Amino acid sequence: MLEWLTQHYIEIFGAVTGIIFVFLEIRQNIWLWPVGIISSAVYIWVFFAARFYADMGLQVYYLSISFYGWYWWKRGGEKVNSLEVSRTGKNLALKLLVLFLILNVLLWYVLKYFTDSPVPVGDSFTTALSIIATWMLARKLLEHWILWIIVDSVSIGLYIYKGLYPTVILFTLYTVMAIAGLASWSNEYRMKMKGYGA
């Protein structure tokens, strides 16, 4: 057991910071962004070692979007700390769907023909959807939780295949926490709408 922990301590640390990230996300605590920066940096190494290149690239994206999200949550667009949970809307949802399809095909092509990725279809799917979901999180769009539930569920199978068991545990918790996050943010949104209607 001690030997296993010694061999996987970086992945375990990344999993722990990932859990803290999602907990802060559910609570809409702005400290999720610096924790996310740490977690992403750790998982760049983990996914590089596992040859999950799209996931590794995704972590680089997470580093960048974390600074954007941190700024946007802090500024709220127009007023400090004014950003509230909102819905995506049909037009934006359609644009995001098209962007997802383009990203998915491009990532699959690169992974299939230019890397030794063992799962290019799954890796490209989860990476493209994660890019969309993280941008939606930065803008506090409620539906981002639905995308995370899908990503996390598919990722569990991918990580079992690669034997990344601490990460399997992490993504199982992520799935449960994403369901809880969807419920929490949905409740807040409903309460906000009732308040505006009063």
Image (cartoon, rainbow, N blue to C red):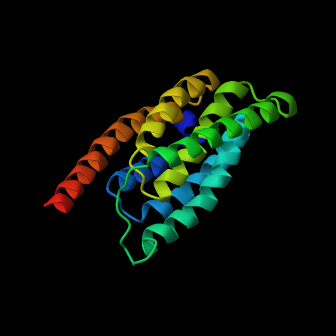
42, 29: nearer the viewer: 29
Please give the count of numbered marks on the rendered protein: 0
Quadrant in the picture for the C terminus: bottom left
Q: Residue furthest right?
A: 114
> Would residue 79 appear left or right of 64 to someone viewing this image?
left
Residue at left offset 63%, top offset 50%: 59
> Would residue 183 appear left or right of 63 to someone viewing this image?
left
Rendered location of residue 90, percent (x, y): 46, 44
- Depicted 92 relative to depicted 175: above or below: below
Residue at left offset 51%, top offset 47%: 91
| Image quadrant where residue 51 sits | top right
114, 19: nearer the viewer: 114
176, 164: nearer the viewer: 176
| Image quadrant where residue 164 sits | top right
Residue at left offset 34%, top offset 37%: 179
Q: Is residue 1 visible?
A: no
- Depicted 139 relative to depicted 112: above or below: below
164, 3: nearer the viewer: 164
